[in-house]
Amino acid sequence: MAKFDYDLFVIGGGSGGVRAARVAASLGKRVAIAEEYRFGGTCVIRGCVPKKLFVYASQFPEHFEDAAGYGWTVPEASFNWSTLIANKDREIARLEGLYQAGVEKNGGVTFKSRATLVDAHSVRIETDGRIVTADQILIATGGRPHTHPALPGHEFCIYSDGVFDLPELPKSIAIAGGGYIAVEFANVFHGLGVETHLVYRGKEILGRFDMDLRRHLHETMVAKGVNIHCENIFEQIEKTDDGRLRAHMKEGQPLVVDQVLLAIGRTPNTENLGLEAVGVEKGKLGDIAVDEFSRTSIDNIWAIGDVTNRVQLTPVAIHEAMCFIETVFKNNPTKPDLDEVATAVFSQPEIGTVGLSEDEAAKRFTHLEIYRAEFRPMRNTLAGRNERSLMKLVVDGSTRRVLGAHILGPDAGEMAQLLGIAVKARLTKDDFDRTMAVHPTAAEELVTMYAPTYLVRDGQRVS
């Protein structure tokens, strides 16, 4: 008889956990996975997927405006929030079913229940109190929005999870935060006709991104009509007699709005999992501490995804899951490679980026060549839209290796995926120069910038 009920038990049914469970089951392993809310996790249920659907919805007003320059007469449009929510819910339910079915079709067992650790090899299924055993345990419980309990009146605020189920579209909203979640929602709400304020404590939005992109996006958002309040914070949120919210800021007059959205970071889901009793060590932020192979302080317990607070992106969690499978079930110890991770910000215009920003590169390399192109995309010319794109390559002046590629403009995320291959492969600027342009495209700028716009030596910009 087998010593354990399962070869692998996964706690958490998000993208990383489901991938690990499905692939392990396809290898013939006895697998079970427990998810207390809905299979699909943050990305599918309350994150990337519904957000992208909302981004698409919010872009149509500009599409309607631009159509006139191309000869189209578009009748006056109207928007129905309830229709968007209903259609979103239907698509999310479809995806949820696929995630759960993917595990079951490969022979895995799914539990719609919270699961907690009893000891190093035992897990309690909380819905019925049953205890099952497993040789290996993988924790992939993700994270949740930080609720900012120190802010007076935070109980009146909403978070990213709740945006997708608001009963009605607010007429006005104030958003705290300057990261990609806050920026994306600011663009979504503005695109849907909502008076939008973005309040951020930093000097510029989107910290850790290339400064050129940060400034350019900020200027573009303001030109569109988004109100951005940098170097400012909320000090108190209070409910008015008419049910609206008054958001008091450190500087300036209070904002009276229908909703206040807090998008100021995320917290790993590690509470009440039994980690302390079993001896699984945690980091300073409550995250699960892991080694370079995703192993916790307990040899047979592993953790991947946002609960480890490494790189909080869905593809990273999936990559970590595949590395876990290689390490544990294929006798091929594999470390997750978290360098040069391409990513996108679905702002309007969107950002696509991979590799080092100019500022980061200047700290590591003594001689940089910066290639920069700013232009109006062809699609904006007949439309009469003045919005401009920005493309930038950061190159090591000694080896000519492309250290970073940064794009702001239409389809920037799509371009970043392909640029990720080039940067990951450590291609040089000469490789870019030898590549034939595809014309007419915006992306051709990436292979036709032959002379540096400027140089950076020892951290200082020179002509």
Image: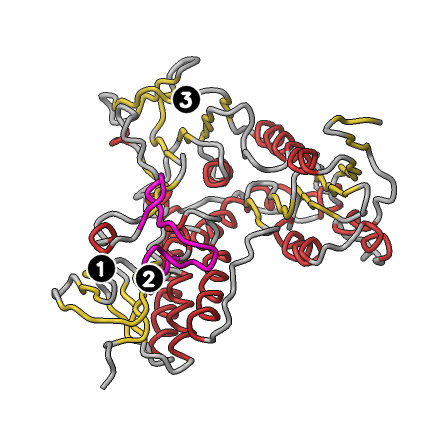
Q: Which residue is mark 2?
A: 301
Q: SS at mark 3?
A: loop
Badge 3: residue crowd in 10 Å (few <14, some 14–19, many ≥20): some
Badge 2: residue crowd in 10 Å (few <14, some 14–19, many ≥20): many
* Residue 255 image offset from top left, x and y in percent: 38, 20
Task: Please report whichever mark, 1 or 3, sits nearer to the chain's N-terminal start.
Answer: 1
* Residue 312 image offset from top left, x and y in percent: 46, 48
Q: Determine which of the numbered discs, if any, sits on residue 233 in the image.
A: 3
Badge 1: residue crowd in 10 Å (few <14, some 14–19, many ≥20): many
In the image, the segment drawn in magenta is 281-303
Task: Please report whichever mark, 3 or 2, sits nearer to the chain's N-terminal start.
Answer: 3
Q: CA distance from mark 2 to mark 1?
A: 10 Å
Q: Are marks 1 and 3 in contact (CB under 8 Å)?
A: no
What secondary structure predominates along the stretch shown in magenta?
loop
Query: Considering only vertical position in the picture, is 238 above or below 48?
Result: above
Front: mark 2 or 1? 2
Q: Is residue 234 magenta?
A: no
Q: Which residue is mark 1?
A: 117
The kind of residue on which mark 3 rests is: Ile
Front: mark 1 or 3? 1
Q: Are marks 2 and 1 in contact (CB under 8 Å)?
A: yes
* Residue 239 image offset from top left, x and y in percent: 25, 24
Name which residue lies at 57% across and 49% down: 343
Name which residue lies at 48% across and 67% down: 322
* Residue 363 image offset from top left, x and y in percent: 67, 34
Q: CA distance from mark 3 to mark 2?
A: 40 Å
The kind of residue on which mark 2 rests is: Ile
